[in-house]
Image (cartoon, grey):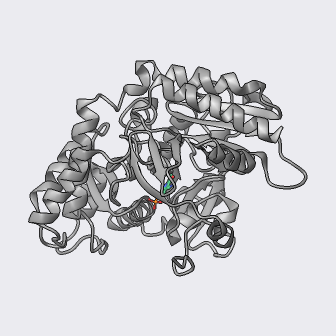
Amino acid sequence: MKLDAHWMPFTANKAFKQSPILMESSSGMRWQTEEGQSFLDMTAGLWCTNLGHSRQKVAEAMYESAKKLSYVPSFNLGHRASFELAERLVAHSPGDINHVFFTNSGSEAIDTALKIAMAYHSAKGQSGRKIFIARERAYHGVNIGGTSVGGIIHNSRHFDRWGSVDHLPHTHDLANNAFSRGLPETGVEKASALKDLVALHGAENIAAVVVEPIAGAGGVLPPPVGYLKELRRICDEHDILLIFDEVVTGFGRTGSFTASIEFDVIPDMYTSAKGLTSGAVPMGATFCKDFIYDTVVGSAEGIELWHGYTYSAHPIACAAANACLDIYEEESLFTRVNSGIGAYFENAIHSLSDLPQVVDIRNYGLLGAIEFAPQSEGLPLGSRLFKKSMEQGLMVRGAGDSIILSPPLIIEEQHVDEFVDKLRAAARDIF
Ligand code: PMP
């Protein structure tokens, strides 16, 4: 088989194709390769397979939907499953977040949120509000809006940012918050940088602030205590919309349905994807409060938002998401982190602080990162440990100096123990 035809995303294509790893099947916490090697998945794929792999109930729901109704456009047409799904999702959402716009990915959900923010201000006669304030080290997907507000330098290396964007400082602080468990105690003052940016740009020009409640791909950075509340307060003071990108933090990852519920800070919009279908089929969603929906939809005579995707609210994706919601609810997975497994995971990853060159371990819910000292030569230790872990049959995520963990929410204590043993074995090969 020739491998060159498929240009793989976010991959060193040449290197991968010299020794490709081809998965053949998956179930629960594991993948199996064509050669029969098994991998313990400590990353939930790409933070998405919250229910574990290849859930039969989800597969069957998709199959039934595909046989009966394989496609309906959602422009001026509908099908029951999308309305049922929307109703169930907003019932779980906090406050008066009562509306959801379906997309096919997290990237599309973010770009949709940015466009809805501009449509909202325009409907209010404030179309000058076009600047977005995001944050350093943020990941908001790879479409042009998400790339522009994103704060990971590599990701905008070849692309000029579009629109007007400014960035708050990230909240990572090794000097004061290393080895914090849960939210770092100090650093709330970093939110006041928003006041400076409002003064610089003028509130009347700012559309929205967009942040991940816990930065994910940027290194798992839980916000300092009080930080998100302070962003909320400043946004309210200036009529600036607050958007949470919950593509990673939604669907039980923190111990609540969303991080906004967990941290008791309600944004005006939030985005989701990944856990929505537990990775079984692409789907994303942009949620908003009544006042946004009412302003944009209520102000229009005809079509109010000139935006949407051929596959928005695709019947098979809606069937998958409804089946996933059944499982989340039946197995109480939105809050499973609080059943003891979250504490077990926290203790386990902090027990690794004796590995050489560890400079930080941080976690919240079933999210964690172990950070190593930067190296003056060669690959960063996070990337090296990622490779060595694969030899042990362990899948973690290498992110520069760190390894990142976000296991499926069905993880049991024995999987956590297996992870610790395998990571130590991988580390012995390096140090
Ligand atoms: N936002 C966040 C916070 C993400 O982590 C991701 C994906 N890792 C995205 C958006 C983009 O989602 P997708 O890859 O489904 O487009």
Asked if residue 267 is positioned above or below residue 79 in the image, the reply reads above
Can the viewer see residue 318? yes
Q: Is residue 316 left or right of residue 42?
A: left
Picture quadrant of residue 203? bottom right
Query: Outermost residue, right direction?
Result: 376
Number of numbered markers: 0
Work out whether residue 267 or residue 80 is closer to the camera in this orientation and state it: 80
Q: Position of residue 47 (x, y in %)?
A: 48, 47
Q: Is residue 112 left or right of residue 74?
A: right
Work out whether residue 421 or residue 162 is closer to the camera in this orientation and state it: 421
Residue at the location (33% across, 56% down)? 285
User: In the picture, which quadrant includes the C terminus?
Assistant: top right
Q: Position of residue 265 (x, y in %)?
A: 44, 35
Work out whether residue 356 or residue 129 is closer to the camera in this orientation and state it: 356
Asked if residue 176 is positioned above or below residue 319 in the image, the reply reads above
Residue at the location (35% across, 64% down)? 104
Q: Is residue 184 left or right of residue 274?
A: right
Q: Position of residue 354 (x, y in %)?
A: 77, 24
Q: Position of residue 281 (x, y in %)?
A: 33, 58
Query: Outermost residue, front direction?
Result: 35
Work out whether residue 224 or residue 5 is closer to the camera in this orientation and state it: 5
Can the viewer see residue 192? no
